[in-house]
Image: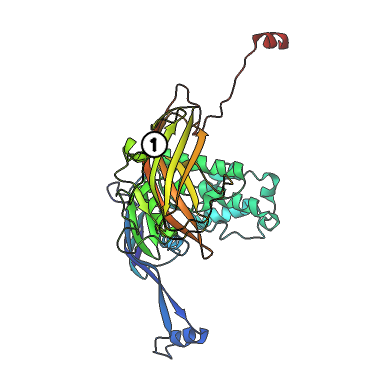
């Protein structure tokens, strides 16, 4: 097992190479068993081995931004600690080319008796900078932390917010070649978080390599070129952020089969409609027949209740997937119960092409109670709203969930089932148009002059 860091970077080589890495821990029933084994007094196996990571391999190229996602205990933070050298792999090798700045446990290594300034020099020295190099970066760190005169006070007098601001400022302003981040972009208040994300974007523009762990799936989708999904120590997916997030959502609701790469329901298949009684007009034509259904849609769920039809309609109740910005539109779906389902919840979301959820709602949020459904019961639910999204292409997802025996259950989900287009003659900043009005009155301006 090896952990290597090369100062001389070969641009043709990966910046980070993780090869068949396993990290195991020994869990002892009693502390004395650990002591006796360390002293060589007991040769019995009085422990269980726990694999935090199990044979994980991946590479990160120069200038790439790669996200690692997974549930708690999946091995994400362990992987970052192995890459930064905080931990040593049990098996496998890790090779890193370039200087790392790691935002893992912010403030680790701070001396609580030292002032903020003294801790900047202490941490800079620990990273490997000379006093002269820290001097050049000092003002940038102070400006970024923005904690005023507290910078000259002992950090033991800091609030938790000031403490993490200073720790983040030190880690982010040392001009790293590789940035390793573990959930650190959510520190401080909303204004400081905005500053952190701007710095993150600046790093991307400069072509720095970034590897980060986050539970913020929107951030993963927005910033990452690739995503790695870990589950119980295994790498179960590596590829586009959108696909990783879709599979991750299956893992969250126990709909992922380990080793198969599939959920309970097949991906990319048309939902099983059963004996469809008719479409919106009472005839045999189904609502969805008006739309090109995504052949790569993601479908899964227990199917206690199932979405058997769906459609999009304009303000004249005509089926269409093209809408004028500012017009009213309706999402409609038909759900059939296969067995008794207590108070199901029906939902829709709209995502952009990167997989970021832009908007959506459900019957619970809209305070529309849904009665218990029994086998064979059907409900039709419609959501009608004004579409003020910016012009562009979007994807519609549908869901039917609920609670059984006190546990949250996914009965049926259809991700990215239909694309919809918003046609706009005027777009503003961001995803959503606030429909602002702007008035310029020359008369008032003349009077003020």
Instruction: Kindly identify the residue that appears in the image at 52 percent across and 29 percent down.
Output: 433
Q: Farthest residue toward the left?
A: 12
Query: On the rendered structure, is 329 left or right of 111?
Result: left
Percent x, y of residue 403 = 51, 59
Percent x, y of residue 407 = 51, 63
Q: Quadrant of the N terminus?
A: bottom left
Q: Nearer the viewer, residue 205 or 307?
A: 307
Instruction: Kindly identify the residue that appears in the image at 49 percent across and 32 percent down.
Output: 387
Percent x, y of residue 115 = 66, 54
Percent x, y of residue 441 = 65, 12
Query: On the rendered structure, is 164 left or right of 242?
Result: right
Q: Nearer the viewer, residue 188 or 305?
A: 305
One can see residue 181 in this view: no
Q: Farthest residue toward the bottom?
A: 41
Q: Quadrant of the C terminus?
A: top right
Q: Farthest residue toward the right?
A: 447
**Disc 1 designates what residue?**
281
Say which quarter of the image contains residue 289.
Answer: top left
Q: Residues within 10 Å of mark 1 (few under 14, many from 20)?
A: few
């Amino acid at each position: 097992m090896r952990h290597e860091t090369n100062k001389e970077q070969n641009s043709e080589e990966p910046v980070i190479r993780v090869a068949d890495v396993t990290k195991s821990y020994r869990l002892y029933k009693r502390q004395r068993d650990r002591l006796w084994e360390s002293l060589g007094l007991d040769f019995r196996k009085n422990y269980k081995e726990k694999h935090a990571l199990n044979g994980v391999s991946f590479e990160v190229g120069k200038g790439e931004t790669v996200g690692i996602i997974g549930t708690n205990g999946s091995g994400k933070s362990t992987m970052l600690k192995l890459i930064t050298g905080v931990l040593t792999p049990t098996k496998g090798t890790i090779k890193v080319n370039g200087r790392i700045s790691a935002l893992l446990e912010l403030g680790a290594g701070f001396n609580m008796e030292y002032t903020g300034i003294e801790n900047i020099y202490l941490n800079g020295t620990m990273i490997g900078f000379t006093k002269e190099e820290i001097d050049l970066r000092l003002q940038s760190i102070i400006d970024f932390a923005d904690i005023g005169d507290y910078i000259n006070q002992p950090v033991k007098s800091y609030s938790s917010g000031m403490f993490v601001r200073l720790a983040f400022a030190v880690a982010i302003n040392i001009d790293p070649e590789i940035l390793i981040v573990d959930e650190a972009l959510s520190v401080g208040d909303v204004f400081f978080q905005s500053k952190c994300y701007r710095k993150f974007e600046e790093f991307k523009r400069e072509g720095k390599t970034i590897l980060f762990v986050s539970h913020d799936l929107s951030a993963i989708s927005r910033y990452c070129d690739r995503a790695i999904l870990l589950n119980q120590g295994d790498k179960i997916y590596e590829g586009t952020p959108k696909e990783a997030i879709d599979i991750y959502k299956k893992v969250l609701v126990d709909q992922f089969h380990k080793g198969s790469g599939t959920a309970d329901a097949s991906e990319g298949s048309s939902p099983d409609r059963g004996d469809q009684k008719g479409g919106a007009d009472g005839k045999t034509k189904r609502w969805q027949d008006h739309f090109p259904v995504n052949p790569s849609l993601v479908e899964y769920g227990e199917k206690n209740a199932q979405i058997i039809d769906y459609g999009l309609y304009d303000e004249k109740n005509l089926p269409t997937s093209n809408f004028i910005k500012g017009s009213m539109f309706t999402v409609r779906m038909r759900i059939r119960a296969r067995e008794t389902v207590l108070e199901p919840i029906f939902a829709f979301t709209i995502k952009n092409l990167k997989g970021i959820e832009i908007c959506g709602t459900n019957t619970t949020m809209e305070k529309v109670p849904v009665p218990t459904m029994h086998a064979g019961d059907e409900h039709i639910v419609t959501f009608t709203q004004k579409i003020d999204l910016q012009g562009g292409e979007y994807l519609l997802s549908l869901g039917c969930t609920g609670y059984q025996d006190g546990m949250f259950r996914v009965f049926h989900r259809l991700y990215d089932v239909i694309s919809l287009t918003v046609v706009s003659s005027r777009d503003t900043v961001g995803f959503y148009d606030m429909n602002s009005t702007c008035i310029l009155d020359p008369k008032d301006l003349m009077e003020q002059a």
